Amino acid sequence: MSPAARFFRWVKDHLVLVLGLLVLVYMFVPIAVVVLMSFNDPGKSKNVYAFRSFTWNNWLHPCHSAGMCHAVGVSVGIGVLATAAATAIGTMAAFGLVRHEFAGRSIANTVIFLPMASPEIVMGSSLLALFIAAHQGGHLGVWTIFIAHVMFCLSFVVVTVKARLSGLDDNLEQAAMDLYANERETFWRITFPLVLPGILGAALLSFSLSFDDFIITNLNAGQTTTFPMFVYGAAQRGVPMQVNVVGTVMFLIAITVVLGNTIYNRIQTKALATR
């Protein structure tokens, strides 16, 4: 058999693996470009995404561009607050929808998907009209952005935590109660640790959505400038390379959280297996 024939036969036998690797490459190429450009020195060139020369200055002076670090701080602060609120409320809503029967449960499950399915321009303009009507002229700023972000993050939290809860085995909780654990002990010792990966995943997703949002934020920000709004404004005159530094740092933080959670789950699984 010729080398070409062996190669095509290997590809045929590992088609799923090959397609998976191609998808990963497709997804990570833009991220690789961002990381590469964080070390780029474009000089006086207007084409900021043409790699000219290697430099550490972008990392040594991340706040060189006026207003960028302030915008990052605003986005991080709003993202943390919106993530905490949306995760707490969404987790409780997910428990209620999965574990309890009540009138209108099916309707509630359908309504949860509406913010996810609605175009952002529709939600953003609706919230803007609400805030203006509520304040008789409107006072837009950090808190209106916070409220808007909590509203569209809630759906993603509920759906993510619901998926985790639906896959849990009720026999584990019943076994804990058979061993004389009360409901509170069962929740904190059995249920919560099992649901925690889903809650962390929902929180990470919420923060990413909040930090990244532009359309809804732009409509309800007033004079407040978040990081996506800063990038949009800077694009009119040339995006500073420090933007790529921020993107690289956020990517590294996300990877660290995901890997840390994976390692923790494996350690916990091995610990339970050895008992």
Image (cartoon, rainbow, N blue to C red):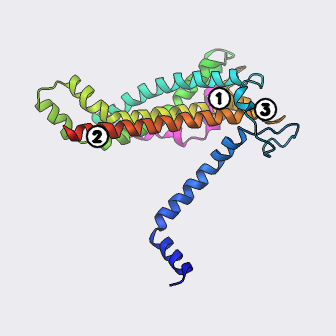
Residue 172 colored in magenta in the image: no
The residue that disc 3 covers is 234
Binning the other alpha carbons within 10 Å of mark 3 as few (below 14), some (14 to 19) or many (20 upward) gives some
User: Which numbered disc, 2 or 1, marks the residue that appears first in the sequence?
Assistant: 1
Magenta region, main secondary structure: helix
Mark 2 is on which residue type?
Answer: Thr
The residue that disc 2 covers is 269
Residue drawn where x is 64% and y is 21% of the image = 73
Mark 3 is on which residue type?
Answer: Ala
Residue depth check, mark 1 versus mark 3: number of the one nearer the observer: 3
Cα separation between marks 2 and 1: 41 Å
- Residue 245 badge: none
* Residue 94 horizontal/vertical position (percent): 37, 34
Helix, strand or loop status at disc 2? helix
Q: Nearer the viewer, residue 86 or 129?
A: 86
Residue 134 lies left or right of residue 19; in this view the side is right
* Residue 220 horizontal/vertical position (percent): 66, 25
The residue that disc 1 covers is 217
Residue 126 colored in magenta in the image: yes
Residue drawn where x is 27% and y is 26% of the image = 188
Q: Which residues are magenta?
A: 105-129
User: Which numbered disc, 3 or 2, marks the residue that appears first in the sequence?
Assistant: 3
